[in-house]
């Protein structure tokens, strides 16, 4: 068998575009949405101007738009909406609270329980809301136990990726591979058809993440820990009904064990009073103080006062102000924006007290703070009402790292949870396809008030939608022009003389490498037709080779940009790029080997 001949000019052009697309997907400075739209536009215009005709007919450029109505994209979007409703209603709040109590009594067993729970939940819903739910709880537990977060957050994030491999709805990658393979004539996988190999490999992975991974990671302090020693200026406001009104200031000092350092007392608009012990506290008095975040919170609780930034306007009804640390999430619209242009006060009702940037912590009085560009690794110390801070937990731009703010919880939480369970059961039993049951579930969430239409649209990600559509369009072009067959022949030429097990193994490894460099959805959609061509050329069952692509595209452990939850964990835990490689490479190699062995045994290769 010689090296495969060069394909037709259309296939060659699509292969070159595929290589360019994979390169563009790795460029951080180019939004993924822009790269995806570029690929789609080039395909449509090129095949419109230079039509391609084969034995099966002419390739109509309109086919490249079919991804917008593809069943896999419908399922992904509907599941994103349904998952957002669980967060919006606080349906998973009881689970987080019980787990938080377990962390106080037995941290080591609690870590194992956290890994198992994260993996289990991720098998049935998008892992992003699960990570968002667990991060504040785990950071708070680690800080209470005075233990580093580095051995907790990264294993938890990886556990959710492992769990997502177990079912057809665990990740958008799974949905895409299953749908594309079905489009090509392969029998559709059931929801739990590939769960057994994942249980074998995943069991070993969870043990590794529990016992080994925490010992491989150097102690890392989360960005919010750097703020704990930073001193901030603030005002403690005495409002009507406070028990200390009418008391001498000496009683205020006594309540705080004489730790409270008061600079001045502001009475009215412009009357400043020295903080003498005999001064009587009056309604509306504002104590001008400076201290750390933790101390300010303690004083607020001990004295029953309101707490505002020194330069903030006192708004009526702002009795319930709280401090919180929030991280800028990957993919957020705030990424790249100047802090002064983000308008957090107007958009979220939040007063920014400090910014943790790569160079350290800057207080609100720092010169040029408003001109600082926000990055996905930045953490803001903010202040706002409890409702405003809780609302951030339902958004997708800022991740609340502080666990002192209650999770949103509504009376519709049981309904949201029951709806999600019904979606899973209907799909698992085969009564309804997942794209229909998920769409029905999303509709029920909206009409029952679990989610507003505004929240539903915010749950959707333009980045995810466009990368899926562009990847599906590339897949169609590769398949129809013969590009996929050519890549399969090149792969077989490169592995000539090897056993089917090695061919399967190297295909999975190739997907694992791609998914850590480019989008996992792109790797999966492009790899699926290649896998089917390889299996057909070898005269072997299609299923193990398709699963090799599915599993390989899910091994997103080696780089932080491989999956968006990796970025969330990196930002929240203060991890370095090397930490992912240190933990992720052994995990990837172990799962690659275990999954290869299980597939080879199950399909008798």
Image (tube, helix red, strand yellow):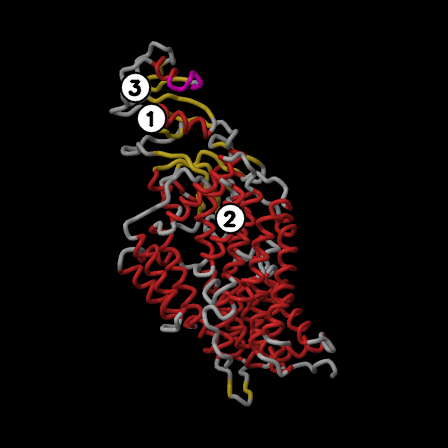
How far, Cα to Cα, is label 1 from label 3?
10 Å
Q: Main secondary structure of the magenta part?
A: loop
Q: Looking at the rendering, which quadrant does residue 256 occupy?
A: top left
In which quadrant will I find the C terminus? bottom right
Instruction: Categorize mark 3 by other alpha carbons within 10 Å: few (<14), some (14-19), many (20+).
Output: many
Instruction: Residue 111: give x, y in percent of width and height.
Output: 52, 46
Mark 1–mark 3 contact, CB under 8 Å? no
Q: Is residue 64 visible?
A: yes
Q: Secondary structure at mark 1?
A: loop
Q: Residue furthest top?
A: 278
The answer to whether 294 is drawn above or below residue 531 in the figure is above
Instruction: Categorize mark 1 by other alpha carbons within 10 Å: few (<14), some (14-19), many (20+).
Output: many
How far, Cα to Cα, is label 2 from label 1?
37 Å
Instruction: Residue 304: give x, y in percent of width and height.
Output: 33, 26
In this view of the protein, which residue sits in the foreground, 287 or 394? 394
In which quadrant will I find the N terminus? bottom right
Q: Looking at the rendering, which quadrant does residue 531 occupy?
A: bottom right
Name the residue carrying label 3. Answer: 244
Name the residue carrying label 1. Answer: 305
Q: Which residues are magenta?
A: 255-260
Q: Is residue 10 visible?
A: no
The answer to whether 323 is drawn above or below residue 581 in the figure is above
- Asked whether residue 387 is drawn in magenta, I would say no
Mark 2 or mark 3: which comes first in sequence? 3
Name the residue carrying label 2. Answer: 336
Q: Is 251 placed left or right of 397 in the picture?
A: left
Q: Is 390 placed left or right of 505 in the picture?
A: left
- The residue located at (50%, 64%) in the rendering is 166
In this view of the protein, which residue sits in the foreground, 365 or 319? 319
Mark 1 or mark 3: which comes first in sequence? 3
Residue 254: mark = none
Instruction: Residue 105: give x, y in percent of width and height.
Output: 47, 38
């Amino acid at each position: 068998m010689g090296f495969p001949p060069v394909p037709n000019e259309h296939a060659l052009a699509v292969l070159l575009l595929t290589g360019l697309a994979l390169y563009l997907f790795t460029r951080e400075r180019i939004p993924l949405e822009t790269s995806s739209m570029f690929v789609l536009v080039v395909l449509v215009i090129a095949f419109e101007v230079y039509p391609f005709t084969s034995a099966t007919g002419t390739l109509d450029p309109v086919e490249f738009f079919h991804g917008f109505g593809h069943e896999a994209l419908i399922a992904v979007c509907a599941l994103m909406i349904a998952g957002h409703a669980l967060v919006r209603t606080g349906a998973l709040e009881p689970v987080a609270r019980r787990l938080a109590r377990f962390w106080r009594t037995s941290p080591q067993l609690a870590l194992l329980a956290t890994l198992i729970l994260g993996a289990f939940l991720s098998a049935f819903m998008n892992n992003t809301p699960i990570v968002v739910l667990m991060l504040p709880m785990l950071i708070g537990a680690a800080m209470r136990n005075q233990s580093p977060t580095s051995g907790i957050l990264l294993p938890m994030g990886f556990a959710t990726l492992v769990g997502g491999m177990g079912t057809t709805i665990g990740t958008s990658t799974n949905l895409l591979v299953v749908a594309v393979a079905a489009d090509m004539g392969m029998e559709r996988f059931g929801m739990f058809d590939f769960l057994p190999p994942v249980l074998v490999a995943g069991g070993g992975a969870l043990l590794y993440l529990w016992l080994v991974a925490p010992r491989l990671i150097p102690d890392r302090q989360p960005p919010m820990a750097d703020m704990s020693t930073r001193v901030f200026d603030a005002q403690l406001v005495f409002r009507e009904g406070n028990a200390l009104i009418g008391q001498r200031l000496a009683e205020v000092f006594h309540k705080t064990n004489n730790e409270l350092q008061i600079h001045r007392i502001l009475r009215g608009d412009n009357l400043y009073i020295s903080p003498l012990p005999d001064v009587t506290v009056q309604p509306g008095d504002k104590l001008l103080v400076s201290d750390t975040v933790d101390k300010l919170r303690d004083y607020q609780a001990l004295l029953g006062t309101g707490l505002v930034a020194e330069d903030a306007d006192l708004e009526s009804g702002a009795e319930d102000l709280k401090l919180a640390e929030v991280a800028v999430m990957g993919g957020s619209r705030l990424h790249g924006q100047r802090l002064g242009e983000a308008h957090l006060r107007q958009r979220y009702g939040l007063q920014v007290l400090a910014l943790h940037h790569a160079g350290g912590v800057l207080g609100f009085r720092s010169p040029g703070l408003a001109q600082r560009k926000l990055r996905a690794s930045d953490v803001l110390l903010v202040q706002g009402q409890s409702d405003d801070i809780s609302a951030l937990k339902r958004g997708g731009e800022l991740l609340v790292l502080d666990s002192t703010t209650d999770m949103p919880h509504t009376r519709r939480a049981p309904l949201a949870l029951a709806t999600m369970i019904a979606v899973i059961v209907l799909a698992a039993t085969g009564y309804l396809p997942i794209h229909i049951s998920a769409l029905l579930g999303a509709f029920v969430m909206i009409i029952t008030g679990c989610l507003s239409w505004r929240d539903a649209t915010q749950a959707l990600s333009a980045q995810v939608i466009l990368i899926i559509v562009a990847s599906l369009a590339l897949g169609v072009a590769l398949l129809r022009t013969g590009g996929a067959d050519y890549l399969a022949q090149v792969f077989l030429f490169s592995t000539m003389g090897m056993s089917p097990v090695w061919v399967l193994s190297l295909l999975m490894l190739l997907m694992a490498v791609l998914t850590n460099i480019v989008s996992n959805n792109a790797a999966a959609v492009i790899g699926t037709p290649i896998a089917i061509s390889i299996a057909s050329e070898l005269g072997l069952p299609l299923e193990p080779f398709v699963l090799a692509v599915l599993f390989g595209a899910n091994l997103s452990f080696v780089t932080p940009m491989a999956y968006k939850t990796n970025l969330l964990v990196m930002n929240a835990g203060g991890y370095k790029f090397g930490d992912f490689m240190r933990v992720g490479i052994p995990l990837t190699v172990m799962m690659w080997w275990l999954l290869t062995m299980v597939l080879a045994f199950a399909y008798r290769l």
